[in-house]
Amino acid sequence: MESTGDTPQERIEVEYYFSDENLPKDAYLLDKNGGKENKPVEIKKICQFPKMRRYKPYRSLVESLKKSTMLEVIDNKYIKRRVPLTIEPMAPEEVKAVLEEEQKKQGINRPPPDQPWMTKAMMKPTGFEEFYADAPVTPAAFEEEQSLYDKDILFETRIETAIQRYRARRKFHQKTAQVFNKFMTYGGIECGPKMFGGSDNRDLAEMDAAEIAAVTATHFVSEDVLYTDRWEVDFAGVAKGFLSCHIMTELESISGQADIARATNVMRNFYNYLLHHNVCPELESQIQAARKVCDLADIELFNVVVANERLPGPFNTAVSATHGGTVAGVYSGEHDWEDSSAINRTLQDCQDIVKFAMSAYGSEQQYDKVGDVGKFQTVYQEQISLEVTKVEMADEATRALYDAAREKKPFLVALGKLHCRRWTYPLAPNFDRSIEALKRQQTEHTMTLWVEENILQYCAVGMKIEGEVRELDIGIKWLDSVRAISPSFFEWLPNEFYKEEKVLKAESEATAA
């Protein structure tokens, strides 16, 4: 059965699935959506519902859903509520209380009525729950840990022991283990079995806690770390590098929030263990600083991911298209752009975007030349590294102008300003610098870019941008392309090369053998 634009029944069905009436009690969809997390759900998953199988083709369904005021379609593949669910999953508190009491009496775990998809294994505590805290250290355990973490013992030995005991007190699911092992490797900790060196069970029975921890360790300080002077202990630095560089390449907006939360939770959980068990009191200030980095990452990283996906934005892309920038020439006449998933407008639309921006934010001289927008020339371009110093949203008057204009040109989006200063990006390629570029580096320390408000909301002071800026002969600068965006706490460490060096070393040794 084919759906038509005149019959939005398919949209009504999907809106019902995500409604306040159905979603709180729909175990399957609630699991996919995450409730308050409002995670995007694959439209194809919805198409598998019995009532939805009659609505074909897929493209028609997607186009119908795009008209929904309740739901938002993402990349033609995913769908989510425009406003996250605020109603708690439907399970009467009195029923919960009775079930919990029964479970306590019987000594078993059962899924709560609002989470029937949970298994018994999933119900067991992992030690990574949001408000989890290690139990108070008993006198006997304190005495044992005094011998394990004595200040006269080398830090390398203490941290190996702590990691081993920490892992024994946590339940690692697959994704949690992946994050932890990546984090350890990035910090110079090898992950893998450690040979017993001939020890048997009788030997273990005769060993004390410190010796057992040493011979059974699966995470240990790498020999490359132990026997070179290139490494130093820096908890905060490793946290910054791991979160701002190492995992950034793996993040995207679809799953980014969950991935970021998992990474910071694992790291914070490990730091808390080190503090709770007094593993390295001489480094307490470093560990506290590393925890603060995790707090910053929870706030900034997802915004950075979204900003990286959305910049340069419609205005900057429009200038690029009409004035010889990166995307110039990807259209034909008045037809839509070939890459319609990225830009779905004509050359005239782009010119209108530029004209309206000049009317809203241009100087008096620029405003007088709005009609000549097609005659402007690009006079300067530079590969540049910038740091955001201020995010300025549009004022009410500017928003009113855009609101009025949007009635006839719905593609117009209110612009704000992104104030930046030059910054040195350690990973920037070595570009040939013109005499003009070298001169500007010495004299032009700040610049202001025009960016849509719906992108500015994801930008923050301190955020780093690596890209190309160009300038028109009337003084308007635009962000032509973006290579990388980083959070305010960005820090690059040589640790990024550690794993690669290990692989090359292993290959070299194998060849020599």
Image (spheres, grey):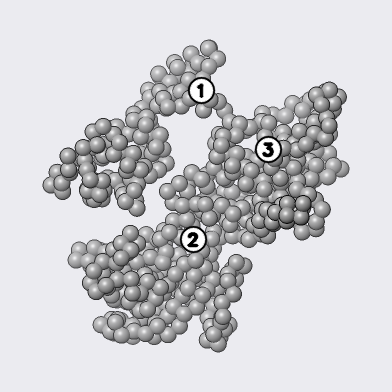
Real-space Cα separation, disc 3 to disc 1, in angstroms: 26 Å
Q: Earlier in the sequence, mark 3 or mark 2?
A: 3
Q: Residue 120's mark?
A: 1
Residue occupying the point 50% across, 78% down: 382
Q: Nearer the viewer, residue 177 or 366?
A: 177
Q: Is residue 18 visible?
A: no
Q: Tell me residue 370's x, y (percent).
A: 28, 81
Left-right relation of 300 to 146? left
Q: Which residue is mark 2?
A: 460
Real-space Cα separation, disc 2 to disc 1, in angstroms: 43 Å
Residue occupying the point 54% across, 71% down: 385
Residue occupying the point 44% across, 15% down: 98
Q: Earlier in the sequence, mark 3 or mark 1?
A: 1
Q: Amino acid at mark 1?
A: Lys
User: Between tags 3 and 2, which lies in front?
Assistant: 3
Q: Tell me residue 359's x, y (percent).
A: 29, 76
Q: Nearer the viewer, residue 329 or 243?
A: 329
Answer above or below: position of 152 versus 480: above
Answer above or below: position of 513 versus 181: below
Residue count near mark 2 (Cα–Cα under 10 Å), binned few <14, some 14–19, many ≥20:
some
Q: Which residue is mark 3?
A: 273
Q: Earlier in the sequence, mark 2 or mark 1?
A: 1
Q: Which residue is most to the left?
A: 6
Element type where label 2 sits in the image? loop
Element type where label 1 sits in the image? helix
Q: Amino acid at mark 2?
A: Ala
Q: Which residue is most to the top?
A: 105
